[in-house]
Image (cartoon, helix red, strand yellow):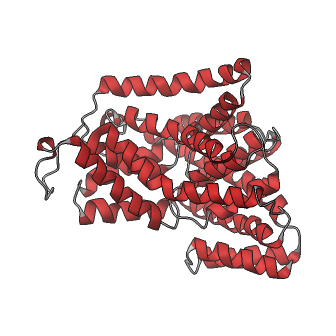
Amino acid sequence: MTTQPTQSDATPTPANEPAKPGVLEVLLIFFGLGLTSFGGPVAHIGYFREAFVARRKWLSESAYADLVAMCQFLPGPASSQVGMGLGMMRAGLPGALAAWVGFTLPSALVMILFAYGVTSLDLSAQSGWIHGLKVVAVAVVAQAVWGMATTLCPDRNRATLAIVAALLVTLWPTALGQVSAILIGALFGWRFLSLAPAPADGSITVSLSRRWGVIFLILFALLLLALPLLAEYGDTPILAITDSFYRSGSLVFGGGHVVLPLLQAEVVPSGWLDNELFLAGYGAAQAVPGPLFTFAAYLGSAMSFGPSGWLGGLLATVAVFLPSFLLVAGMLPFWQAFRTRPGAQSILAGVNAAVVGLLVAALYHPVWTSGILSASDFMLALAAFGLLQFWKTAPWLVVVAASVVSGILA
């Protein structure tokens, strides 16, 4: 599929080019970004802007801002969804798939290899350097709470909503409790938060029709409803894993860090993975470039349930990202009209405030309760937080340093 170019395109009209070179171009560019994009989703969005707006001029500033706004509105990993949207605008559905593969593959491979190191080499979850990964996870989640609370809870109403959501999830620590908190946030925003609709500037041009958009949205909803039933009555590990990771990918509002409590609720209580190894993998995920959702590749490879090794990692990765692909493909044809409707911004504001509450609850349990076991752990986590938040140190450097220090102190 091809798209109409913006006036600023410096290349010949894409409609006159064959699809395959466009898809290969998207794949190679995003693979390079997947190898070098450290720093989390906000940094990724900055890298994308530099690569595709400033340097290659694939789209205008206003169109890029529109695309980012849509991906922040949808559940799922915002930076990966922006990449899928850019690929779709450039080369249709194959371009969206190529963008996802290129951006995701490097970090997914690293996380699968890390899982092999932890499980196949029988590395102890209590060893000093792995405990350091759990300690640094405290700093990473605390930084996410700090930044998101400042941006998404700027007033008393939204701050109160975040606290209520945190209390609810702490008292009801299940996936259903987390979904309930998000729904309460949406209803509260719709009823009590009065925000003006977004202006109707910017333009996103895709060749995908609204009919296909409806098909993708229906497929997203059908899988969300049908997979739990299939997993219950099919009684196979593959269906159970697909259902768990698909639901987690469908219900994550607010970025990759929020997937932590959802996935923890799926894989730890069920006995698929020990909580110590779960947090070790989450800490390691901070040290690799690309999307944080590739944490699923580690979980799928390290779990004692279902397909083992890289096959489990591939299954979990595809399942957790599939909702994002379906939602981006489904919403892009409609976004320009939807974003200007009254109430849309208010609902989004309520959901985002509830997400902050979910992250606060996750910071306490399982992150703090598993990572901070002594005064030295607290000091190491506080130092890591300071390096991340105030000194803007690269996350992978902080992860490596915390792991080394913890190993020395053990």
Q: Which residue is nearer to you in this view: 282 or 260?
A: 282
From the viewer's perspective, is residue 392 above or below residue 371? Answer: below
Q: Which residue is nearer to you in this view: 306 or 157?
A: 306
Q: Which residue is nearer to you in this view: 379 or 118?
A: 118
Q: Residue at the right extreme?
A: 374
Q: Which residue is nearer to you in this view: 186 or 324?
A: 324
Percent coordinates x, y for residue 232 in the rendering: 73, 21
Percent coordinates x, y for residue 305 in the rendering: 76, 39
Q: Is residue 224 visible?
A: yes
Percent coordinates x, y for residue 386 in the rendering: 65, 78
Q: Residue at x 38, y 24 (%)?
A: 214
Q: Is residue 99 left or right of residue 146?
A: left
Q: Is residue 60 left or right of residue 134?
A: left
Q: Residue at x 26, y 38 (%)?
A: 206
Q: Is residue 268 left or right of residue 1?
A: right
Q: Residue at x 23, y 55 (%)?
A: 58
Which image quarter is the N terminus in? top left
